[in-house]
Amino acid sequence: MDEFPYLSVLTLLPLAGAVVVALLPRSRPELSKVVALVWSLAVLALTVVAWIAFDPNGERFQFRESYDWIPAWGVNFTFEVDGIALVMLALIAVLVPVVILASWHDADGGRRSVPTFFALLLALECTMIGVFAAGDVFLFYVFFEAMLVPMYFLIGSYGGARRQYAAVKFFLYSLFGGLLMLAAVIGLWVVSAEELGQGTFDWQTLASLNIDDTVGRWLFLGFFIAFAIKAPFFPFHTWLPDAGGAAPAGTAALLVGVLDKVGTFGILRYCLPLFPEASDYFAPLALTLALIGVLYGALLAVGQNDLKRLVAYTSIAHFGFIGIGIFAFTTQAGTGAVLYMVNHGLATGLLFLVVGMLVTRRGSALISDFGGAGKLVPLLSGVFFIAGLASLALPGTNAFVSEFLVLLGTFDVNRPVAVLATLGIVLAAGYVLWMYQRAMQGRLNPALEKAEGMKRDMSRREMVVVAPLVALILLLGVYPKPVLDVINPAVEDTLSHIENLDQAPTAASGEE
Amino acid sequence: MSVNLAQETVSYAPAEGALSSFWLLIALPLVSAALLLLLGRRADRWGHFLGCLSVGVAFVLGLVYFFTLRGLEESSAELTLFSFMPVSELQVDVNLLYDPLSSVFVLLITGVGFLIHVYSIGYMAHDPGRRRFFAYLNLFVAAMLLLVLGGNYVMTFIGWEGVGLASYLLIAFWYDRPAAATAGKKAFLMNRVGDVGFLLAIFLMFATLGSVDFEDVFNGVPTLSEGTVLAIGLLLLLGACGKSGQFPLQAWLPDAMEGPTPVSALIHAATMVTAGVYLIARSHEIFSANETAQTVVVSVGAITLLIGCIIGCAKDDIKRVLAYSTVSQIGYMFLAVGLGGAAYALGIMHLLTHGFFKAGLFLGAGSVMHGMNDQTNIRRFGGLFRYMPITAVTFGLGYLAIIGIPPLAGYFSKDPIIAAAFARHGWTGWLFGGIALLGAGLTAFYMTRLFVLTFLGPKRWTEDITHPHESPATMTVPMILLAIGSVASGFLLSLGLVDYLTPSLGPETEVEHGPLSHLTVTLLTVGVSVIGAALAYLLFRRGTALEEQPARSPLVRAARANLYADTFNETVFELPGRLLTRALVYFDNRGIDGLVNGLAAGIGGGSSRLRRLQTGFVRSYALTILSGALVVTAALMAVTFGS
């Protein structure tokens, strides 16, 4: 291995940071914050180097490392990334330092340990990087479950009202999905043992197996339900508004921005290539659930009174778009779906963080406790508006490109779904502008004016938090090509497993 | 495929020389907008000058490019800046096109836009948000220029939504007023309904032709089935109706008058609302290829022009009368571009003259409001001619232009449209021609009512006004220049515009003759207009009641209620939407979540144990994971040793 072991270092680096920060004395809270921030910036720097070293025109999987773990069962520490995983790693690397800086005072108050909070954030980063970088199905499963632990404590110990209820609900839902996936993982191993004589968890080997249709469908369901809960798709979504509403804002940004993407990523990486026949068989069901998610999530977002829950419901609509893009099985829709995963992480991450800043100031997340806030905090409301525009996929923001690609690619093969999903853009404008009007416009709420926190607009620290996200939202809205070029080959390779590569459109039209 | 052979293929020449820098047209106002927003209060003192300067320079550049293009043989210049969305067969570039059609729009947008920027210096002088206002105005100009300079449908769409955003920001500029915030939201939402149509049209183009570039789409039209062409046309029309306030998406435009008056002049009269006309004219290869699509466009135009006129007669708010007048005049433009052939150019010509006189009328209305403590009710004006002579004269010239009195601008642009409508084959010619003629009479009626009640007759002012004043020079000079345009633009454009636009809009330049000669139509139109104007003068020269009187006829009641368009939208879309949302929220909390919680309680053996779970025995979860891991291990061992 003459190459630098990017992926194992990237995974272990934040874990080491977590240990160091956790060992810092509770009496030095500021030190732990600084160490955690610097550590996460180091991870970002290494990720940038990895991004540069990655060759978009090369092999699909790069930076492969493999170490023995449990040889008797064919379990290895295998890491490798393709373009899809790489952009997710980049998203994590950008979001974690931003979230650490945004959460600067979230653990203050002395009730709970500050170093533990930041150690948990770094531990979470380790498991998130691991889950995307895993090249071994068992390793993926381990990280998939391990991710729950830091998130559970972040919500349950540092969250707002109803944090215990939300944390347990999140945990039980995920655990249920995880157990189903575990059964499927074992099943997959059994299949490989039967076919190859020696069981394996290596993704590349498993992807070349010929799995019996019936077995494939059962295994598909095991993975799919786990991922559909994680993403979440309708009707497995009710844990998300509770978790998103109760989690500290920064944690919610990571939860919805990255953690949930493991669901959609998992479908692309595990369901489609390992079980192409089953994916095709269940595609109509998945498309229907995703389409319901688009419209249902948006309508519910319109009906929310709590800012954080509202943002959580908008994400259910956005996950619907991603699901449609994945199961349309066209290059444009698939590439759009992956780009959507990144863009949604940035846009909704920003939205959660800005909402967090508002909630901290007001001491309430209820929209009715705001009203006319634009007069008091013009800068904050301006950033809130930009995040909202990205959420409704206005051209010029990154989300437009991904939503456009998903819908265009879907229209090519499934017009009813695409047409109905396109109606979602009207609903998106509705929930964003309605939320903005209720919170920021109109007459100034007298109680709001008296709130001490609302007397300060954004601080220097908060500006540093939002600046990189706003910049990326606009930059990727104008020039998404570098990211598209990284994603596209991996998506094309994924779809080649389905043997359903989109035909040339002139041939597909069949007109004249 | 004989049609295909007869049809000339569309191809655009690459931009060279001076024209290779025409992207600056968009960049200048965009950079200015960004600076004004980013610098914040630091730019308060000079921000408005930068705003004016960027648009002024863009206008000068627009003139340079205009004359450069006239000297070229190809009469088009295409510029590809960089690759935007490359995903296998889909290749969308940041691609701009400068041709005769876009060149006249550039001059309209930057020229009229510059005058309105200057006017705003005075109009917004006392508003603490003036810098922000200029930032939004510049943002609008940049987006509008992208809309008309886009070289493929995606670029046009980006400009399209960009102007929607700018329009939202400007309508809701005084965002602490609930009515303004609501009007902005309404405009954005109704526009988005139209945008769904535009988007689906783009998807359909890609699905059938594999491209969204103008060249490929236009050249590919003959290869498409009739149904596909019709579908693309109608979807584009839906987009056009949203942006241009045409039936059935017209209800947002009058509400948009909640924004500052310069916004109404620039966006909701002269430029943005004409984007629908631009889109149809730009896509004339598509519309000309399908007669049904054309008939629908003509019908939309005819219905809308009547709706606008009828409501315009019943409104008392000076800006709302002008807003419905805009709705109706754009109806004329839709009528023209729907007729197709030579009438495309007539639609564009009316669009340009309308840009002058309607912007002038709005600025005049703003000047009246400026001098009358922001009063907008024409029942409370009267006799202002003496106090605001410049406003009255410039407004009067715009008024004479819009009702089509020769030789002012409206006469040269509206008259040929009415003639072309009569020339449509069969009974439809009589129908659409008749509607257009009736519209001319109604226009003369409500515009005369507006002018007489505002500037002539007895004073009916509210008590707080003692001495209304004329506006400062930054406001009157733009009004004077626009008034000159209202007088002269029609004649000047009639000399060469139609020929100039030929490379963009196709070779037909002669409108066929219908059953009526052009002279007959002209006489009829002028006659009807004079009758309408005389009637209004006789009715209103002595003023009117200070309060709205109860309406006797159902038509007046309907007109005052905007022909029940808002009521319709509320009962058919809003109310069910609200009920559905509420029902779904209930369903989500009680139905799905209730089911899950109930299930969990059942498995956990009663709700008391669940509550204990929820209060948090972390160890029990750790145990659960552990048991999960044990299951794996056991299974793996079983398989390993079993085989």
Image: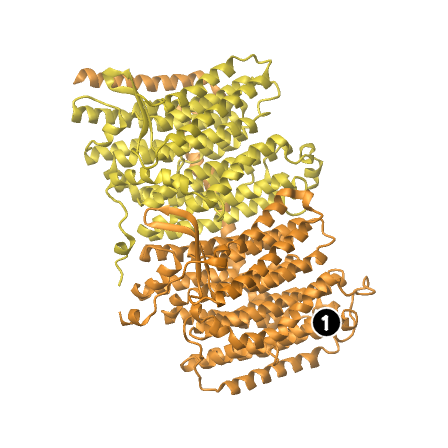
The yellow-coloured chain is labelled A
A352 or B133, nearer to the observer: B133
Which quarter shows the C terminus of chain A?
Answer: bottom left
B139 or A95, nearer to the observer: B139
Query: Residue placed at 61% from the left, 46% from the top?
Result: B35
Q: In x, y percent, where is residue B352?
A: 55, 69
Q: Is residue A305 left or right of residue A274?
A: right
A95 or A293, nearer to the observer: A95
Q: Is residue B476 left or right of residue B139?
A: right
How are the colours assigned in the image? by chain
* Residue A289 seen in the figure: no
Query: Residue placed at 36% from the left, 43% from the top?
Result: A325
SS for dot 1: helix
Q: In x, y percent, where is residue A352?
A: 53, 35
Q: In x, y percent, where is residue B342?
A: 44, 75
Label 1 is found on which chain of the structure?
B
| In the rendered image, the vertical position of residue B514 relative to residue A32, given as above or below | below
The orange-coloured chain is labelled B
In the picture of the structure, the residue carrying the numbered disc 1 is: B392
| In the rendered image, the vertical position of residue A63 relative to residue B112, given as above or below | above
Q: Is residue B71 left or right of residue A177?
A: right
Which quarter shows the N terminus of chain A?
Answer: top left
* Residue B505 seen in the figure: yes
Q: In x, y percent, where is residue B338?
A: 44, 71
Query: What residue type is disc 1 on?
Result: Ala
Which residue is farthest right? B466
Which of the 4 image quarters holds residue B267?
bottom right
Say how many tags the image has.
1
Label 1 CA crowd tier, 10 Å (few <14, some 14–19, many 20+)? many
